[in-house]
Image (tube, helix red, strand yellow):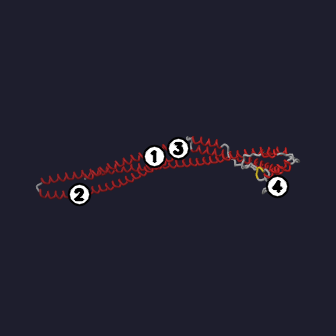
Amino acid sequence: GTKRDVRGKPTTANLARQSEEDSRRPSSPCDDEDVDLVRSSLPQDTPKGKQHGGGGRVLVPETPSLEHPKSTQSAAGGEAGKGEGGQSAQGKVAMLAERREGLRREAEEWRKREEKALTEQTEAEGEIERANKILEEAPAKRSVAKTGHKKKMGMLGLKQAQLHEKGKELGRAKEKHEELLQEEEAEKKRKETVEEASRQVKTITKEDQDAREERERLEKELKEYLKRVEQAKSEVAALAEQENQAAVQKQEAARKETEESMKHDAWMAMEKQGIASLEKRESELQGNRDELHKKHAAANTELKCAQKTLDEIKQQCRGVRAQAKATEARVRTLQERLEGTSLARQREEAALAKLKEDCTAADNLEKQANEQAGAYEKEAAEAISKK
């Protein structure tokens, strides 16, 4: 008997030897070219298309999954979309949604084509199985069905080659389908980046508005404070002038009364009375001086409070400046992330220029406040030294 493989079928070597023995028999006029014709009809370059196991069985090559063939055009469209820096974020979102819908429809179409190809592959596998069965029965029917067997094996080889080419095409389609999925994921990430940038632009705009309102409030408070300082300076000056005039008038009146009293006959008595009157007036002047000193002390206290308020305003101005610098840094960071969008870059440049103007205004305001406070302190010190 002939040797058989694990499936109980004759091995290829035994089939070949049996074919040679049959060819030498006179009752079976079949030569070696029959076997060569059958073998030559099968594809020899495929790794899984060779004879396997038993009786010239033909195996089907593995077919990779399908992929979209238009991914090159999609990638080109994506590259073109990168160059359109002038579009707004909303336009890009709409374009990405439309592109995603197109990709979904194309993927559905290719899934249908893949199912069709798999159906054809299943049919081809059935045909190959039937051909294998015919090959197993061929040694017993070789002399009877020689011509028909040659024709069937030729058609089988052609079908196997076509199936191999189709498998290669499906492999390329699978690679393109993977590239299409990666491109869709990249478009999704770019969309998320644009949305995040839009949210940060809105946040920075709101912070800029809050900083502008805070600066306006501080300017208003500083103007009111300077107004109160000017009013206090006027009141102190008027009070000092009034007290000086009153003291001079009282001294002049006392001097005249003393001269008149010396002209009277009772000079000694009048002198004592004038001395007492002068002492009384000096006591009154001393009381007026004490009251003036108290008013000066109160003015100094108010000046210190005003200086403290001014320091607080300066501190707030420095905080506004620091916040403006931090906002400027965030704007620069956002500018680097949105470098491809010209409209966002223009908004960032405008916001940066506005922040620089606010910082300059805050510096000028602080400088002006320092100059006014220094002048007021100098005038107050001169007024106190005169008294």
Q: Earlier in the sequence, mark 2 or mark 4?
A: 4
- SS class of the residue under badge 4? loop
Q: Which residue is mark 1?
A: 355
Q: Amino acid at mark 1?
A: Leu
Q: Which residue is mark 3?
A: 339
Q: Earlier in the sequence, mark 2 or mark 3?
A: 2
Q: Which residue is mark 4?
A: 2
- Rounded to the nearest whole Å, what is the CA distance between mark 2 and mark 3? 77 Å
144 displayed left or right of 310: right
Observer-nearest residue: 262 or 343? 343
* Residue 265 seen anywhere in this rendered image of the structure: yes
Residue at 20% x, 53% y: name it: 251
58 displayed left or right of 80: right
Across and down, in percent, residue 86 comes to 55, 40
Q: Earlier in the sequence, mark 4 or mark 3?
A: 4
Q: Earlier in the sequence, mark 1 or mark 2?
A: 2
